[in-house]
Image (tube, rainbow, N blue to C red):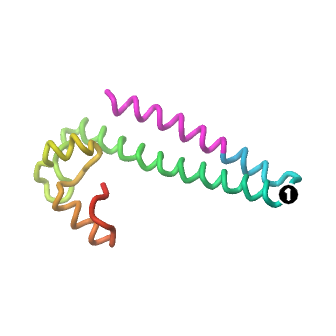
Amino acid sequence: MALLERARALRSEISAKLGDAATDASGSGRQGDYGDQAFASGESSLDLAEAGRDLQELRGIETVVSAIDDGRYGSCVDCGDQIALARLQAQPLAMRCTACQQRAERARGERPGSL
């Protein structure tokens, strides 16, 4: 299953990014000019941001795999209606129908078009 392969890849990427962030952070305490220290700090922050993004995707995949196992995949978590096949093909991690997703985004103050 492609989702399980993606989950394995994400776990590896998260581990690597967290390791890189730790290396960058420990390197920022070494002697060097402020530019070197700022660069190392920036690299560490970027690694952590990328790991966070990957972790969010991994959690989405785990939620979808659980829904598939339980026979709930394709049903909106809010209203229970079927999620359009075209939506699932475009966004396999979608857990809401388009209408419920738009309502959820408006409630959070997000712009339309997110997951």
- Residue at figure coordinates x 41%, y 46% from the top left: 57
Q: Position of residue 68 (x, y in %)?
A: 24, 37
Within-10-Å neighbours for mark 1: few <14, some 14–19, many 20+: few
Quadrant (top left, top right, bottom left, bottom right) of the C terminus: bottom left
Q: Position of residue 95 (x, y in %)?
A: 24, 50
107 lies above or below 7: below
Residue type indicated by callout 1: Asp
Q: Which residues are magenta?
A: 1-20
Q: Quadrant of the N terminus?
A: top left
Of all residues shown, which one is farthest toward the right? 31
Q: Quadrant of residue 6?
A: top left
Instruction: Name the magenta segment's main secondary structure.
Output: helix
Instruction: Give the residue at x 27% y 42%.
Output: 92
Is residue 21 one of those drawn in magenta? no
Left or right? Give the position of 90 relative to 7.
Answer: left
Is residue 16 in the magenta section?
yes
